[in-house]
Image (cartoon, grey):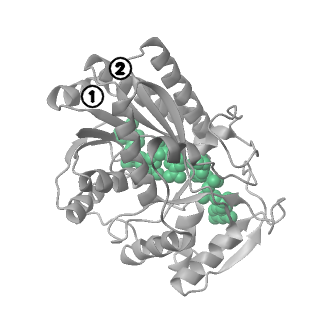
Amino acid sequence: MRYLLTGGAGYIGSHTCVCLLEAGHEIIVIDNLSNSSPVSMERVEKITGKKITFYMGDCCDEEFLDEVFANEQIDAVVHFAGLKSVGESVSIPMRYYRNNLDSTIALCNAMSRHNVKKLVFSSSATVYGANDCVPLREDLPLGVCTNPYGWTKWMNEQILRDLVKADPQWSVVLLRYFNPAGAHESGMIGEDPAGIPNNLMPFICQTAAGIRKELQVFGNDYNTPDGTCIRDYIHVMDLAAGHLKALEYSLAHTGIDTFNLGTGEGYSVYQMIEAFERANHLTLPHRDAPRRAGDSPISYADPSKAHKLLGWKAVHTLDDMCRDAWNWQSQNPTGYPKED
Ligand code: NAD
Ligand code: UFG
């Protein structure tokens, strides 16, 4: 098959490229490189020994999208492209609404015009809001989001539901990711955050590398067994494999369906620190700090629907995530180089 990946040069997209190329598919990537490096694409080609067709451009630009669809025969699309920093979305909400909503609308318009109606969308567990009915199931009512980034995912889901209602030829798969972590086992591609990382695993890695002095544990007084927040960390290669299954599902079905991509296991911040230290034989400087605004105490998936309908299950362990994240960090202390 020939799959188009918007945002395919980013963290999850680049790992998904590897997975799809290794499964024998052809890949076309559109990315404006606003939060990624073209080196990730070169590295994917090195890992797989296969070529990617890359278009540098913006998914909000319908004329540009029309050109891509006119040039390429495409069977289905994964829409990763989006801005994802929670904190930044609070300070510059209009940039988030403009980019994350316009890109989806422009993409779907172009897809309709070119009669490509199979779409896998990157949503997030953030749409469950502060719902603490764990494990979180896809049929729970959507929550109240705590930031504009979360609302863009919530609104994108609604836009896509309305699209499918109006045109039943569409097939849309909404994937709600839990907490992606780790890297490809080669250490050649991985998460390359700009500036100070917001997320736990990249912060842990940069602390272990000595780039950050210490990890702050945000809140130790939550109503959880050790007082720190619990999340469902999932290896990025498992997440990538979920996209392969979701694409196959989109080709075989019409309508809209939603799947959690998580392991079903929750780990606390303290447990993550312990696991990272154990897997990599090092000590991580850390200290307890006040709670971070907007954090829900506990979030983990019920992944059984993806298991049953997609035939997908996470197979990597927490130690794999810790080892692979550190392998990437150690080999690329400052992320991707400017030139490769
Ligand atoms: P990322 O920032 O590494 O990748 C997103 C890519 O999209 C980047 O390469 C960026 O340059 C590109 N992009 C952004 N806006 C674009 C536009 N208008 N046109 C073209 N390219 C554009 O992020 P990621 O972690 O790989 O996340 C991929 C998707 O998954 C995002 O939609 C994100 O919101 C979602 N998601 C991520 C997480 C997570 O924790 N990483 C969790 C849940 C959902
Ligand atoms: N944490 C720390 N110290 C840090 C960073 C994080 O203690 O330096 C804690 C947080 O308080 C939280 C846990 O580690 O308890 C996980 O935090 P992350 O920021 O890594 O993950 P979140 O679950 O808060 O958010 C992530 C993504 C969101 C997405 C959400 C649900 O960042 O984009 O998962 O999918 F919406």
Q: Position of residue 51 (x, y in %)?
A: 16, 53
Quadrant in the picture for residue 68: top left
The residue lying furthest to the front in this view is 308
User: Residue 107: where, in percent of width, then height?
Assistant: 36, 27
Disc on the earlier residue, 1 or 2 = 1
Label 2 sits on a secondary structure element that is: helix
Camera-side residue of 322 and 287: 322
Q: Secondary structure at mark 1?
A: helix
Q: Residue at x 36, y 44 (%)?
A: 7
Q: Which quadrant holds the N terminus?
A: top left
Image x and y of residue 11, in percent: 41, 55
Q: Which residue is mark 1?
A: 65
- The amino acid pointed to by label 2 is Asn
Q: Residue visible at 35% across and 64% down?
A: 189
Disc 2: which residue: 109
Q: Say whether marks 1 and 2 touch (CB < 8 Å).
A: yes
Identify the residue at image location x=58%, y=41%: 89
Which kind of residue does numbered mark 1 sit on?
Answer: Leu
